[in-house]
Amino acid sequence: MNAAVRGAVAAGATEVLVNDAHGPMRNLLPEHLHPAARLVRGKPKQMMMLEGLTAEHEAAICVGYHSRAGALGVLSHSFMGHEIEDIWLDGRAVGEIGLAHATAAAVGVPVVALTGDDAACAEMTAWDESVVTVPVKYARDRFAAELRPAEEARRAIEEAVLAALTPVPKRPAAPEDESVLAVRWQSASVPAVLLGIPGVTALDSRTVQARGPLPALYRQFGVWMRVASSLTNQPPYC
C-alpha cells in the first residue's frame, strides 16, 4: 500500500484516500501507513470496496486484488468465500475487479492500476487493457503461489502507479443506460429471500437479478450480501 502511495505522490497527488476493504476491513496498521494518506477503516460501509470514492478523485488504484470465483488464482472468490458462485454485469462474467472498475467509472473515476497475483492481473487486462497491472505473485493453485521478492514488488508497484498517473488520466464517459446485475448463489434460500426486495427478479432457483444505475446497484448488491450472510451464518469477505 505504501508503495502505491509513494507512486501517487511522486506523480503529483495532493490527496490520497486509502480504503481498507478486505475481510474485516481492519487489515492495515494505521501507524505504519504513509503520512500522505488518509485511511478509511472498518465495516459496514455502504460502498464496500469503494467507500469514499467521489467524482472529485482523479483516479482509483486497486491494491491486493484477487481473481473471481472459479478462477485458478490465489484466494479466488467473488466477495463472499463460498456463497456466490457467479456474477454477471450486463451479461458479462465479473468478479470484484470488474464490478469495482465499472462502478468507479460510473462515479466518473478511472481505475488506472491494479496489483495482485497474475490471475488477477489477467482478469483486469481482459476487462480493460489500458489499466496498468503489477503481478506480485504467480499462482500455483488457490492457496499456493510463487512470490516476487518484497522489495522488487514494492518497487514495481511504485513505478507502475507513477506511470499510470503520468499524465493525469482521462475521465471515463458516464454510462448511457442502466445496468443489469445478476448473481448465482450456492444456496436457493438466498434468492428466495432476496425476491422480497422490490426490483429483484429470479432467473432460476439460485439466480437473481436487478436493473438500475451504478453505483446504486453496487450499494444494493451490498445489501444482498448482508442478507446472504444472515442466512448462511458466514460473514462476507468484504
Image (cartoon, rainbow, N blue to C red):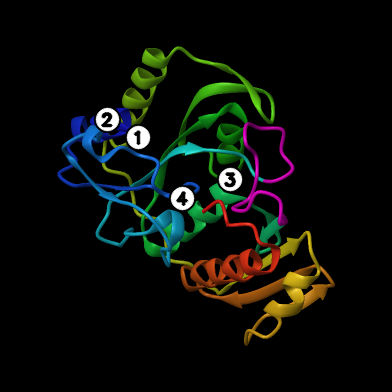
Q: Tell which tag, 4 or 2, sits nearer the viewer.
A: 4
Q: CA distance from mark 1 to mark 4?
A: 29 Å
Instruction: Looking at the image, tell me whether mark 2 or mark 1 is earlier in sequence order.
Output: 2
Q: Amino acid at mark 1?
A: Ala
Q: Position of residue 110 (x, y in %)?
A: 39, 50
- Name the quadrant containing residue 191: bottom right
Q: Are marks 2 and 1 in contact (CB under 8 Å)?
A: yes
Left or right: 112 as drawn, with respect to 188: left
Q: How busy is the neighbourhood of tag 1: few (under 14 within 10 Å), some, or many (20 plus)? A: many
Residue bearing the label numbered 3 = 127
Q: Quadrant of the N terminus?
A: top left
112 or 193, which lies in front? 193
Task: Find disc 2 in the rendering and name its residue.
Answer: 7
Can you name the residue that lies furthest to the front here? 233
Q: Amino acid at mark 4?
A: Pro
Front position among marks 3 and 4:
4
Q: Label 3: state its secondary structure.
A: helix
Whole-angstrom CA distance, mark 2 to mark 3, is 23 Å
User: In what element is the residue under mark 4?
Assistant: loop
Q: Nearer the viewer, mark 2 or mark 3?
A: 2
The residue identified by callout 1 is 164
Residue shown at 69% from the left, 73% from the top: 209
Residue shown at 49% from the left, 15% from the top: 148
Measured from the top left, where is residue 20 in percent x and y? 38, 47
Q: Which residue, given by chain and number where applicable, does mark 4 sit on?
A: 24
